[in-house]
Amino acid sequence: MEHAKTCPKPDVVAVMTQSLMTQQPASPPDVYSIALMTKSSSTGQISQDKIITGR
């Protein structure tokens, strides 16, 4: 199960789902930060792929 290490922790996913399900007043900023986190992580993977392909 080496693939599980690269994937995000189930706890993080659970927290994200809970915040989305509850939709509390303080949810928008949380969702925004989560979106930024996912964007940064995905871009990091893309940059690594670009480096590998560029070489």
Image: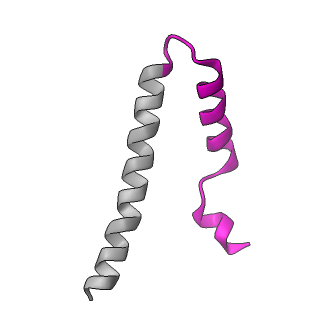
- Residue at 58 percent across and 65 percent down: it is 6
* Residue 49 drawn above or below residue 23: below
Colouring method of the image: one colour
* Residue 14 drawn above or below residue 3: above
Q: In the picture provided, is 42 more to the left or to the right than 19?
A: left
- x, y (%) of residue 1? 74, 72
Q: In the picture provided, is 42 more to the left or to the right than 24?
A: left
Query: Can you tell which quarter of the image residue 37 is in?
Result: top left
The one nearer the camera, 28 or 5, is: 28
- x, y (%) of residue 55? 27, 89
Query: Can you tell which quarter of the image residue 22 is in?
Result: top right
Reply yes or no: does residue 45 show up in magenta.
Answer: no
- x, y (%) of residue 26? 49, 15
Q: Main secondary structure of the magenta part?
A: helix
Q: In the picture provided, is 48 more to the left or to the right than 17?
A: left
Q: How many marks?
A: 0
Query: Can you tell which quarter of the image residue 15 is in?
Result: top right
- x, y (%) of residue 54? 25, 84
Q: Which portion, as a residue range, is magenta?
A: 1-27
